[in-house]
Structure formats: C-alpha cells, structure tokens
Image: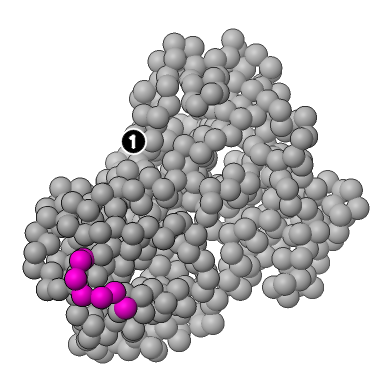
Amino acid sequence: MTPLARLARGMFAAAVAAVQPGALLRRVRFLADGVEFGDATLAPRGRLVLVAIGKAGPGLAAAFVQRAERQPDVAFVLAPYGTPVPEKLAGCARFGRHPLPDASGAEATRELLALVRGLSAADGVVLLLSGGGSALLTEPLAGVPLAELAALTDALLVAGANIHELNTVRRHLLRAAGGRLAAACPAPMLALALSDVPGDSLVDIASGPTVADPTTCADALTVLARQNLAGAFPEVAASLAGGVKGGAAETPKPGDPSLSHAHTMVLGSGHDALAAAAEAAIHAGFRAVRLGRSLRGEAREVGTALAHLARSVAAGEPMAILAGAETTVTVRRPGRGGRSLELALAAAVQLADVPERCLLAAGTDGIDGASPAAGAVVDGHTLARGRERGRDALAALAANDAWGFFEGLPEAIVTGATGTNVADLVFVLAAGAPAAFIAEGARIAARVSLPSSQGRRGR
C-alpha cells in the first residue's frame, strides 16, 4: 500500500469515528427529567419513550441509554438484519430488510405505530433517526401490496433513481413516512436525525416520518413516468392517482397542525465526517479543499471526472480534495458491486500509470451495494495489480462487477458495518511530488481505527 493510500484510509477512519453514535450523543444535554438539544426540550410528566431507527439505530440507542440521567420507560429499536445490537437492548430490537422492504419491517412498523398511538399528551418520544429508515418503516398504505412495493423499490434502484426521487415515491406509499408517524402520535416528539442525504433534507432522511412533506402524489407519479414504471405497477399508480384526488396517499403538508408537537433537527451529518477527514489531511501536510456534500450523477461518470481532476493538479503543494457523494448506478449487467466501488474503478481506469495520485470512495456505513466492502482506494498501479490476477477493469465496468475486480486486492476497503451512516465519502489526493514524506499519514491511520461493534447480531 502506498503512503497516499494509507493516508486516505486514515482519513476515512477519522471521518467514520467522528460520526459514531457516542460522539454525536455528546451534543445532547441530558437533564434529570429528560433531554435538551438546541432550543428544544423534552421533559414529559408521563412516560419517556425512546425510538431508534436505521443503520445507526442500535448504536444511537445504546449511547442514549448510557448517558441518560432519566432512563426511558419504553425503548424500540428497528435496524437492518445483521446490525449488531448491544445485549441490554436485544429485547427491544426489531429487524427488517434493506434496501428492499419485507414483512418483518412491515410488522415492526405496525408495532411502532400502535405504540405511539397509545401514548398521551403527558408522554414524550425521543426519536433517533438514521439512514436506512425508509426501507425499514415499510408498512404500505391500504391497497398497496408489500410485494409490489418491494418490486418497485428494486426497479427504481436498478434504474438509477436518486434518493430524492426514491423517497418522493416512498413517502406517498408508506404508513409511517412523510410526517405520518408524528401525526399518529399524540405525545410531544423530539426527533434527532443522523443525515445521510445531500443538503441534510429532513424530508429525505428515512423519508421524513416526523416532518411535513412538500412533495405530492402528483410528484411521485411524475417519478414513475420518468422511469417508465407506471404501467408495470398498476396498484401503486392507482393509489397515487387516488391521492391526487384527495385520497389517503397524500401526506401532511407544511403548516399541518397534526405535526405541531414534533420537533426535528439534524444531530450529525457528512459535514462532521468531512471535517475530521480534512483535519487528518492537514496534519499530514496537505492543503484540504472541500467540494461540499452533493456530488451526484452516475457513479462511473463522477469517478472519471474526479480522476481527470486529480491528473490536472499541478506539481507542488500536496492537495486533498474531499466531498460527500450520493451517486447512482444504472444497472446494466448482473455483476456485484455498489456505487462507491464503481466510482473508484472508473477513476482507476483514468489514473492508470499516473504517479502520486489516488482516490478513495467508500460508504460510511461500511456497506456498498451488493458487496461486502465499503468501497476502494485506487491509484496509478491499480489496473496493473488487477491484470496480475487476470482481471479486466473495463470488462468489470461493463458488467457492473466492480467487486469482481476489487475482491482480494489491497485496494478493497472492508470494514463490516460501522454503526453509523452519513452517506458516501470521496477523497482525491495529489502529492505533487514523491510521497515518501507522508509519514504522519501512516501514523494517523494507525492511531484512528474504524470502530468495531460488539453484541448480538439480529437476524
């Protein structure tokens, strides 16, 4: 592994550590009778209910329980299958499939809705939201079969629909999305969200279960039409068409009084992860340039563009370019991979034989698509290392089989589930000169390790 690649991995480790649940919950003020965050306080006279949903749900719930002066009277955790859950929370954990919905997620959603409907105005709910919640809160509206919902979700993902398009549809098909969870709850609710979406749009984090939805059933139908899917899913289309005419599929809109008791705020985001990665790069002697957190588009096209950017950096001051990404992959062939791996492989093609440049692309949740990897870090030697094992990068790209190329190579970043999720990170490093001077980068990588989760694994 080159010094640049070691530094990139160290930056990624620092980024993931910065958005661990324990670090983020230190931002919450715990009171004798409740909690305070920003200008919102929740100190109920009745029961205190803790709900944690998403990939980071178990970790957020555990950190809350560890730090809280007042322990919750009721706890409910919903996470993807296989997410580690601390032993003390095992009894209140539920699991569902991700990214495609299943019956277990639907059943857990019904259970959660029954729980919040049974509360009173004297009670209070702390809701800890994180990425993956949309696929878990998956009980559909009446008239929408779960199997059709799952097939539609898969079709939208294969077609390369972006997160806003996907969640616009889901908000109008799910019983707990688009403000409906909060509307069903008579108790005050404080929702703290770990953002995994561009711009930290509250309506897109877990499909906005506690916030008003500015989009409409007509917008959802437009998404289906744009992707040529309306005819393939007649019951979904009928439900959305009914919503346009005032049916149950429409969601609470801004100003709806049913949401006045719910306060939703961002607890952490990719901004925190990028700040930690930038600090690691600066300590290694690099100038850090942040492009923001809204890299979008087809993953291979973004990877190609970033590789050209890396090649264009003039020799001289070493530079680290950092960004958050929410790219998409249009699936053409049945290979294995994900958007970060495909982005990295496309970049590797353009960086072949280019010295002192590297690119890292990885998901902060540790999972990239249908692979066991978080992503990959590539440089000018990546294609040659692949050829030594009989692998063709262009063929792998054509087959959407980036993991088939990276499997077993030192480029692969395999962390397992990290217990957090603030979307994907992309780093471009340009040394400008031979990178042997990056000793500090190696020390950072050794000092900051990805957290390991311990506890019961749900099935």
Element carrying mark 1: helix
Q: How is the image coloured?
A: one colour
x, y percent for residue 170: 68, 54
* The quarter of the displayed image where residue 43 is located: top right
* The quarter of the displayed image where residue 341 is located: bottom left
Q: What residue appears at the point 59 percent right and 10 percent down from the top-left corner?
A: 45
Q: Nearer the viewer, residue 92 or 158?
A: 158
Give above or below for 240 relative to 396.
above
Left or right position of 202 against 448: right
Q: What residue appears at the point 86 percent right and 59 percent down from the top-left corner?
A: 241
Q: Nearer the viewer, residue 77 or 296?
A: 296
Give above or below for 387 relative to 295.
below
Specify start and end residues of the magenta stretch as a single range: 312-318
Residue 261 visible at all: yes
x, y percent for residue 319: 25, 64
Q: What residue appears at the point 21 percent right and 75 percent down from the top-left corner?
A: 315
Give above or below for 425 relative to 335.
above
x, y percent for residue 156: 63, 67
Residue 28 falls within the magenta-colored stretch: no
**Residue of label 1:** 23
Q: Residues within 10 Å of mark 1 (few under 14, many from 20)?
A: few
Left or right position of 264 against 343: right
Q: Main secondary structure of the magenta part?
A: loop
